[in-house]
Amino acid sequence: MSKAPGRSPKGTACISCRLRKIRCDGKRPVCGSCSSTLPSACKYSDGSASPDQLLREEIAILENRLQQLENPNDPSRTLALQSTSSSASRAPHTPLNISLNMRQALFRSFLPYSSEFGFYLNYSRFSLALSSSSSQQQPFPSILSACQLLGAYLSPVNELSALQSAFLAQALYDASLGLSRNPTQLSRSLLHCVQAEILLSQYFFINGRSLEGKYRISTAVSMVLGAGFHKIRSADMYAFQGRAGMHSLPPPTDPVEEGERVNALWQVVIMNSCWTAADGSTSHIAYDVPESRIDAPWPLDAEAYSQIPRENVQGRHTIQNFVSNTPDNGRSLLALHAKAAILFEKASLLRRQYQPNMSLPEATRFQQTFTNLSNIINNMANVLPSFSDPSHSRSKIRRLVVVHTLCRVATIILHGTFSQQDPSSHAQVLSAAESVAILFRSVNLTDFPFVDPIMGHLWMIVANVFIQEINSQGTSRMPRRLSLNELMGSTEVIMSAMKMFAPRSSLIESQLTHVRQSYMAAMS
């Protein structure tokens, strides 16, 4: 048995050993630890390497490892990050052991925009956990690797961005490990796993992998319903009985943890509502079934749970009350986002339910539901905070843009059912579409390094309104509200917005291609 290399003086280890956090004897040209894995001489910083230099070195090592994983039969490449004698072929997964320097770089890229990806965990507590030296306090691998993946996606460092496939493999592996078996860690583990599923779904949608994105949403739905998050503070004490998971979760330790559970539920509702509406699939949540009916109160913004007492707060039929136009106190940005997503889903569902040959009772019920939903959408659009308020942070503006667009598109979808026959519906569709175009004329999109991928679908719907109007110029019986030049200008505003994000999202890129083709056909 060979003798382990002795430890070199502090600061003189080779870069590879330093990044892998293993003992280095400092021998040159190849140290003892690297002699069996690296085909060339070790690299030394001689104690003067900057963090940026070390990061570049680590990226090079990770690139080598990624190419090895992609081409396992290529004998010219070795797995530089392997720190044990076991070969990669014998292990189902080889962890990405990245340095603290690289992890910090990835989180610096991700955390400022985390809320726009659906990050609901308490930011202050999560930041403390990241810096904790206790393994019991640190975030679980599932959420760490998902954040690192999105950090690579957002990173301005091209070499880091190029490693997304390696970070995705790690994130999928960590997500597959499931919940902690330690009862004292179960609640935190569940919150982190649900958060990881949401982040992964966003990443898949960005990259046009909608089936995988939908799968991640369904997994998150199963987790929050199984844990009973939809019945938190339910006024109906018998509403949730016998479902697996509820009895095994301990009560939240404090209002902040309870808030994380509530916000996890509503973030999952947002994702479910948006993407089932987008593709016309069946919702993963049966809102009208007692077992899955949401009784939890509307969410607060994450930092508010430690400031606002909620001892006497109870809920029942939360979504049903909202779509029945019952007043509530759901005014946080997350609550507004959830409401807009629900209205988008409800409008899409109602439009699919319409049949031109309905019986009189069916038509009467449909008209009542249609009118009620239209009123709720209009009321909400009128009370949304202005995104142009100078007191808003950039993050809040970016999120409000999504909420405003969801509301306007809900109107377009709902009234689009009758827009070719009814002048009132036609006017509402055009007005809603023009509101979105006006919004994007006034918003500085350079402040948006990322956009929620559902926006690509919403933009396509808005652009199609203008394109259909262009196509019907001179033939439609509807009153002309916009000139051809105005329609062209509004279409091009939406296309310009899509063009900004198409290079970073294959989903939006494909949707932009579709819009361009339709626009060119209309103008020919």
Image (cartoon, rainbow, N blue to C red):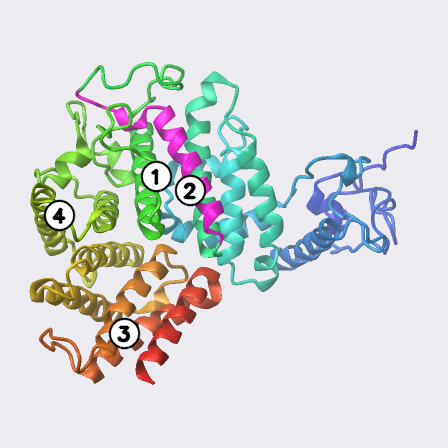
Q: Is residue 263 left or right of residue 362?
A: right
Dot 3 falls on a residue whose secondary structure is helix
Of pointers 2 and 4, the one earlier in the residue sequence = 2
Q: Which quadrant would residue 94 be assigned to in this image? A: top right
Q: Amino acid at mark 1?
A: Val
Q: Is residue 164 left or right of residue 235?
A: right
Dot 2 falls on a residue whose secondary structure is helix
Q: State the CA–CA distance, disc 4 to disc 3.
A: 26 Å
Viewer-proximal residue among 461 and 329: 461
Which residue is rendered at x = 61% and y = 55% of the image? 163
**On the image, numbered disc 2 is attached to which residue?**
198
Q: State the CA–CA distance, disc 2 to disc 3.
A: 34 Å
**On the image, numbered disc 1 is attached to which residue?**
268
Q: Is residue 101 visible?
A: no
Q: Amino acid at mark 2?
A: Ile
Of pointers 2 and 1, the one earlier in the residue sequence = 2
Viewer-proximal residue among 45 and 375: 375
**On the image, numbered disc 4 is attached to which residue?**
373
* Residue 209 spot, x, y in % from top left: 49, 52
Magenta segment, which residues? 209-235
